[in-house]
Image (tube, rainbow, N blue to C red):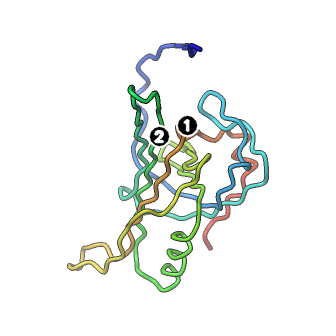
Amino acid sequence: MACSLTIAGRSLPCKDAIGGVKKVYFGEFDATDWGDVSNGAIGNSEAAVTVYGFEVLKNTSYFTETITASVENGTVFYSQEVSLTFPKLTAADQAQLQQFGKGRLIIIVLDNNDNYWLVGVRRAAELTGGTASTGTAYGDVNGYQLTFTAEEPIPAPSLTKDTAAQVTFTEAA
């Protein structure tokens, strides 16, 4: 069976996009929470979803998605990586870090263009590495650098405004 290919083309966009992550939200993974993806976006959430906000310092965190394909095997998947820097080592953060390590997560990345990206929407994201460091010099980071990864059958979808309205975004106190 041949796969249909539809191509709409793409013109050069305006030069108004900027890099970086503004904020991230973490929630418990449940693949049944998210509806179908259409045109690269989640159109409607299947259930009420609560996520918890974590602020990051500017110019320290990123989301990257790598396409991995094998012509020989006829496969393609998307490796998603979220790298975050949280300043200041604390005992409370150590406890949260342990929870991240134990859980299967959904991560919503809010980029600096105010786009929401869902990482691990079908197969979950997990904490796969990181460091806690005091730094050496006064100007060094004292805090956590964490890496979360997901391997997904689809690219990270964006949230539409309607779906974002169905998500409870709980902000830090």
* Proximity of marks 2 and 1: CB atoms separated by less than 8 Å: yes
Secondary structure of the residue carrying tag 2 is: strand
Q: Residue furthest left?
A: 137
On screen, residue 35 above or below 48:
above
Q: Nearer the viewer, residue 110 or 102?
A: 102
Res. 146 mark:
none
Question: Which mark, by number, is residue 154?
Answer: 1
* Rendered image quadrant of residue 16: top left
Q: Quadrant of the C terminus?
A: bottom right
* Residue at left offset 48%, top offset 86%: 91
Label 2 vs label 1: CA separation?
A: 6 Å
Q: Nearer the viewer, residue 152 or 11?
A: 152
Task: Give the vertical position of 71 relative to 132 (above or below).
Answer: above
Q: Earlier in the sequence, mark 2 or mark 1?
A: 2
Residue drawn at the location 41% of the way across and 20% of the way down: 12
Q: Residue furthest front?
A: 73
Q: Residues within 10 Å of mark 2 (few under 14, many from 20)?
A: some
Would you identify the image quadrant in which residue 139 lies? bottom left
Mark 2: amino acid: Tyr
Image quarter of residue 3: top right
* Residue 150 position in % (x across, y down): 50, 51
Q: Is residue 40 above or below residue 156?
A: above
Give the total of numbered labels: 2
Q: Nearer the viewer, residue 40 or 16?
A: 40
User: What is the residue that sits farthest to the right in this orientation?
Assistant: 47
Where, quadrant-wise, is the N terminus in this rendering? top right
Q: In this view of the protein, which residue sits in the foreground, 20 or 124?
A: 124
Judging from the image, what secondary structure is the residue with disc 1 in?
loop
Q: Are there few (<14), some (14-19), or many (20+) residues within 10 Å of tag 1?
A: some
| Residue 40: percent from left, percent from top | 59, 32
Per the image, the residue denoted by label 2 is 78
Q: Amino acid at mark 1?
A: Ile
